Image: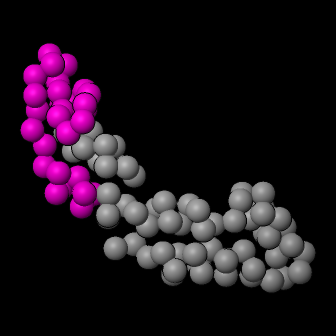
Amino acid sequence: MRLVEAIYQLNPSIITIRGDVAYDANEQVVSYDLAAAEALVAANAYKDQRATAYPTIQEQLDMQYWDGVNGTTIWADTVASVKSENPKP
């Protein structure tokens, strides 16, 4: 999650952000809590880290197929490893 996305999520009245200034639909300046937005970004950082660490869907499907054929747990072990290396806060 990017900072601007967090600001929008925390402040639904904000329609646009130009520089560091946020505006509502009437072009009125809207204040926002930057620290809260930064905290939201930090709290969700693990999602982006996991997304880049997981093998592609094609690779995961292949792992699942071969796990079924060979009676192994490579796919589950791989997913568990990514989750443990990138824990939820």
Find the residue positioned furthest to the top: 26
Q: Tell me where residue 74 appears, x and y as whole percent.
A: 75, 80
Residue in the image at 23% along x and 52% along y: 37
Q: Could you tell me if residue 80 is visible in this image? A: yes
Q: Nearer the viewer, residue 27 or 10?
A: 27
Find residue 82 and report its image quarter.
bottom right
Q: Tell me where residue 8 appears, x and y as whole percent.
A: 27, 39
| Picture mark count | 0
Q: Tell me where residue 21 appears, x and y as whole percent.
A: 17, 34
Q: Tell me where residue 60 appears, x and y as whole percent.
A: 74, 65
Q: Nearer the viewer, residue 67 or 49?
A: 49
**In this image, 37 relative to 30: left or right?**
right
Residue in the image at 63% along x and 66% along y: 54
Find residue 57 and report its image quarter.
bottom right
Q: Is residue 59 magenta?
A: no
**In this image, 88 relative to 16: left or right?**
right
Residue in the image at 51% along x and 81% along y: 84
Q: Could you tell me if residue 12 is visible in this image? A: no
Residue in the image at 59% along x and 79% along y: 80
Pick the quarter of the image with the C terminus: bottom left
- Where does the magenta region start and end? 13-40
Q: Is residue 24 magenta?
A: yes
